[in-house]
């Protein structure tokens, strides 16, 4: 069952997928339609999940489940990964590679392989104050507080 993202409780479990490129506005419209259809039919052991999604910066797809109502199970999580893989193929993007870093350079959002980000840190092209997207957050509440943070406040701090 689809619930608007802003109405999901802070304890809701989330999964964040970052694209290696920015989606066009037309792609975002299609992706939003596909996401809504997926979320409306997303189920665990035949029971519909109270779920939602959010699209951020034309680059991030966030799926959310209110686990207080019905927990996402292995099969339901697998179905969400299959859905994300279908989006990867449809739009020729990478959404599942966790060895990439997305961060802000002024108003621009940059996406680099982890090794390049480390090199940029060493060369002082990015700093501990650089705003990074910490995609390791687990809940909507954590997402609100700790998703867009200075690198020094996330796992990225080890590079500085």
Image: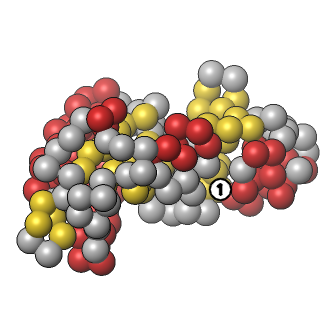
Q: Nearer the viewer, residue 4 or 29?
A: 4
Residue at image position (63%, 22%) is 107
Way the structure is coloured: secondary structure
Residue at image position (65%, 56%) is 113
- Tally of numbered discs: 1
Give the quarter of the image for residue 7.
top left
Which residue, as the protein is rendered here, is positioned at the far top? 107
Horizontally, is 32 left or right of 144 in the view? left
Name the residue beneath numbered marker 1.
113
Residue at image position (72%, 56%) is 155
Q: Is residue 81 above or below residue 148?
A: below
Horizontally, is 79 left or right of 37 in the view? right
Crowding near the residue tagged with mark 1, few <14, some 14–19, many ≥20 C-alpha atoms within 10 Å: some
Q: Nearer the viewer, residue 89 or 36?
A: 36
The reply to whether residue 103 is visible in this rendering is no
Residue at image position (61%, 26%) is 108
Q: x%, y% of residue 40?
A: 12, 50
Horizontally, is 153 left or right of 21 in the view? right
Give the quarter of the image for residue 104.
top right
Q: x%, y% of residue 32?
A: 23, 38
SS for tag 1? Answer: strand
The reply to whether residue 39 is visible in this rendering is yes
Which residue, as the protein is rendered here, is positioned at the far front? 68
Q: x%, y% of residue 130?
A: 76, 35
Q: Is residue 138 above or below residue 21?
A: below
Q: x%, y% of residue 159?
A: 84, 55
């Amino acid at each position: 069952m689809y619930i608007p993202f802003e109405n999901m409780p802070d304890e809701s479990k989330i999964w964040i997928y970052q694209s290696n490129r920015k989606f066009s506005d037309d792609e975002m419209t299609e992706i939003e339609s596909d996401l809504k259809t997926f979320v409306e039919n997303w189920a665990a052991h035949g029971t519909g999940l109270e779920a939602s999604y959010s699209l951020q910066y034309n680059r991030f797809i966030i799926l959310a489940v209110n686990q207080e109502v019905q927990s996402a199970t292995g099969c339901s999580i697998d179905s969400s990964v299959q859905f994300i893989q279908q989006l990867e193929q449809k739009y020729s993007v990478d959404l599942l590679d966790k060895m990439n870093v997305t961060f802000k350079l002024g108003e621009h959002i940059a996406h680099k392989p982890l090794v390049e980000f480390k090199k940029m840190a060493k060369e002082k092209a990015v700093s501990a104050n650089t705003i990074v997207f910490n995609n390791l957050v687990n809940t909507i509440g954590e997402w609100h507080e700790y998703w867009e943070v200075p690198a020094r406040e996330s796992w990225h701090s080890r590079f500085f």
